Amino acid sequence: MNSSTFRHARRLVALLWPSLVLAADPSGAMEARLAQLRANPPALYAFLLRMPKGGDLHNHLTGAVYAESYLDAAAEDGLCANLRAGSLVAPNKNGGCGEGEVPAARSASDNTLRNALIDSFSMRGFVPGRESGHDHFFAAFAKFNAVKPEHRGAFLADLTRRAAEQNESYLEVMAINGKPVNPLADKAGWNQDFDLTRRQLLAGGLDSVVEQLRARLGDTEKSRRAALGCDTQPDSPACRVVVRYLFEVLRESPGQQVFAEALAGFRLAAADPLLVGVNFVQAEDGAISMRDYHLHMRIMGYLRQTYPKVHVTLHAGELAPGLVPPEGLRFHIREAVETAGAERIGHGVDLLYENDSGALLGLMRRKHVMVEISLTSNDMILGVRGNQHPLPEYLKAGVPVAISTDDEGVSRTHLTQEFLRAAISYKLSYADLKEMARNSLKYAFVEEPQKARLQKDLEDRFRAFEK
């Protein structure tokens, strides 16, 4: 080969080398593709829609339902719409609507009514003013709770279909709570002696109520699968999505009820593989939530020791400066980890306001405590976004994180949109996003054999996506 030919060959190799490297390294090709798409959000959205995302580990069923679905169910139930409150209400004893009310079915053809109710039920178009985003968000749930519980299976089916369409393979849904045990709790009384109260509740028939809750959970799952046609089409994308449930303990309740609900959740999770963990719900800044936070963490820690095989994830640190006094920001995440033994933290937004946040990050890294990140929710409820959010700090410290939706219907979002927001706001790499998808299964509470199958399936999906 003469020198001229050699120089030509060397130039040709130099030109082709990047393509050869990317072909040999699909992750490199995906990084380049993501970098190219970052300046074009709609195109990046299309990319992320197809990308395997593992699971959504932080999803409240009542908040995951879109307002349009609630309106369809309200029409079916014959409910009325209260025009002033922007809420659904039951008809009067004569089956009609009262003063200032109209049939909810009218929203199918009256766009003014329909739009007003959708805006009332969600954060769509909301502009903070006399009402804050926080207050509008939490007020939404009372506005559609007149819808009959018989729709839960259909709502779950919609949620599962949406997950399948986004290349998700797993959902953990907060969909059952312990309200039915509250009369037993009030009868048993409360002196904060956990052992004594537990014995009194069990002697008073708590397990009978737990069996009723178990039957309700089983019926909900059956109706979800029936709505999807999983008995006849078990291999359809939606039916391939694995769904498990989390138990909700209402933290804005008296102490005896919180204890009884939590106990019921632990006993149900210990008995039924469909229920994989326990969580607290309701606003963390609520009066009782703040006053009794230490007590609640002690209750969870006690029950974790009593039922060590039951998993716990906790809303903790869903707070921001100004929402509570400064001292209220300093301990919630730490107590959830140290006192309650939480394996995962929901939100964790007030991280940098906690006492010795650096040591807390180190503790979470060593204990492999994963954080469920819900960016849209944190923005709409707390006003925390961009460089105010601690996501970069968690990543820098090596604390595992996964992207979640929280209340996708009320927030008018979905998991792909959350990945898009994360990728753009924090310039995350493809490797970052892939790790988050893997974390959503690695730290899922699903039983181990199923988890292994889900993890293998996720890797198969990534290989197909990266071709």
Image (tube, grey):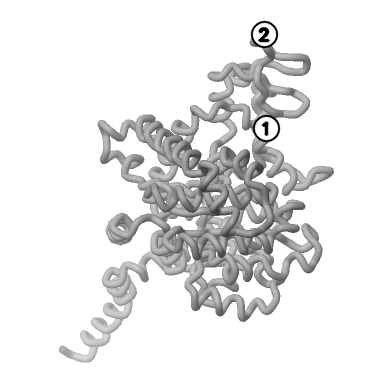
Residue shown at 53% from the left, 19% from the top: 76
Q: Which residue is mark 1?
A: 143
Residue 283: mark: none
Q: The disc labelled 1 sits on which kind of residue?
A: Lys
Residue 8, placed above or below residue 134? below
Residue 395, placed above or below residue 465? below
Q: Position of residue 407 (x, y in %)?
A: 58, 46
Label 2 to label 1: alpha-carbon separation: 22 Å
Residue 178 in sight from this viewpoint = yes
Residue shown at 30% from the left, 74% from the top: 21
Q: Which residue is mark 2?
A: 94
Q: Secondary structure at mark 2?
A: loop
Residue 427, placed above or below residue 417? below
Which is more N-terminal, label 1 or label 2? 2
Residue shown at 68% from the left, 47% from the top: 253
- Work out which residue is located at the far bottom of the displayed protein and give it: 3
Q: Quadrant of the C terminus?
A: bottom left
Q: The disc labelled 2 sits on which kind of residue?
A: Asn
- In the foreground, 41 or 346: 346
Q: Position of residue 251 (x, y in %)?
A: 65, 51
Residue 138, placed above or below residue 355? above
Q: Position of residue 429 (x, y in %)?
A: 47, 68
